[in-house]
Amino acid sequence: MFPSADYPDLLVGLEVSDDAAVYKVSDELAVVHTLDFFTPIVDDPYIYGAIAAANAMSDVYAMGGEVVLALNIACFPAHLPPALVTDIMRGGAEKVREAGGVVAGGHTVDDNEPKYGLAVMGFVHPQHIATKSAARPGDMLLLTKPLGVGIITTAAKNDLAKAEHLAGAIEVMLQLNRVGAQSVPRFDLKGMTDITGFALLGHAQEMAQRSNVCLRIHSAQVPLLPGAREYAEQGLFPGGSRRNRDYFEPWVRTAPQVAEELLMLLFTPETSGGLLIAVPQDRLADVEAFLLAAGQAYWIVGEVEAGKGIELD
């Protein structure tokens, strides 16, 4: 763990910025705290609320925690029909209930553009916290959701996405990362992050940097949602793809055979993406069996090596 000299019970905070803050309450209990909110990415208000909640709770899961309590964070135009506001918050509340937690209030302000999300509190055992800084050479890299949400929702905003592709993206965004988090205490896993705004390569680089290792990612093994490659070939990337590439590419060494559209997909932001888990090889078979038994999809997308940065082949 990484307690601050000034705050010894703050196990994860600004000094080791991670997916969420973790504060030790006792030798058996630590509190995980995070927040996240964003503008609508789908038209259906209920689904928007549920996706926003799943995305916010994902940071608790990325630390190996369980969700306990959430508070609404909401910015709504004064003219927005009350029924729409109700549907958004109902979507969020029911997704939190699915996680085993409860929404216990929150705060709303007037704003010209709708924004919704949650401040989330969870519990974790102080000895079973997963962080970005604990990947070790020899670990295998597991990813628990396919990529492509960012480009598919961008295509949908431009009325260019097929209905079945958008439906597939929504299904992935609504899925909780709870099962992956439950593997942390069960198999004493230490290295993990979730894939959101910085895309697979950005979040992988964060893990590589903070663990002082190299992450080798096999591009052909990275799962993609149906439609993602098609829209990539049409160049329908959101602005965040280019910003991520501009920032993170200096740490990414890309093999010549990796197609340009695939590289850009791996730099494309995800919403409510999956977990990237570093699994020691001697525990890999047990982790795989656990995920399969729980109905959790996963893909082995690479491994951890000595060195720095990302090797993409």
Image: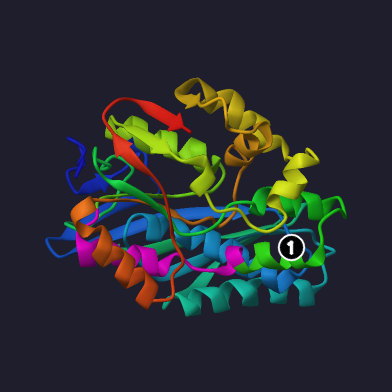
Q: Is residue 277 left or right of residue 43?
A: left
Q: Is residue 93 left or right of residue 79?
A: left
**Please, what secondary structure does the residue beneath circle 1 have?**
helix
> For the view shown, which residue lies furthest in the top direction?
250
Return the x and y of residue 230 as percentages of the image width and height.
Answer: 75, 48
What is the quadrant of residue 55 in the picture?
A: bottom right
Question: How is the structure coloured here?
Answer: rainbow
Residue beneath disc 1: 166
Residue 178 belongs to the span the image colors magenta: yes
> For the view shown, which residue lies furthest in the left direction?
27
Give whichever of 183, 261 is nearer the camera.
261
Q: Considering the image in quadrants, where does the N terminus appear? A: top left
Residue at the spot 31% in from the left edge and 70% down from the top edge: 289
Residue at the spot 52% in from the left edge and 71% down from the top edge: 105
Q: Residues within 10 Å of mark 1 (few under 14, many from 20)?
A: many
- From the image, give the main secondary structure of the stretch colored magenta: helix
Give whichever of 263, 204 is nearer the camera.
263
What is the quadrant of residue 62 in the picture?
A: bottom left
Return the x and y of residue 276 as percentages of the image width and height.
Answer: 41, 50
Return the x and y of residue 70 as percentages of the image width and height.
Answer: 47, 67
* Numbered disc total: 1
Residue range corresponding to the magenta coloring:
172-189
Q: Is residue 236 visible?
A: no
Residue at the spot 29% in from the left edge and 39% down from the top edge: 133
Return the x and y of residue 249 as percentages of the image width and height.
Answer: 53, 24
Residue 223 belongs to the span the image colors magenta: no
Q: Amino acid at mark 1?
A: Leu
Q: Is residue 6 visible?
A: yes
Residue at the spot 58% in from the left edge and 52% down from the top edge: 147
> For the view shown, which residue lies furthest in the front direction?
257
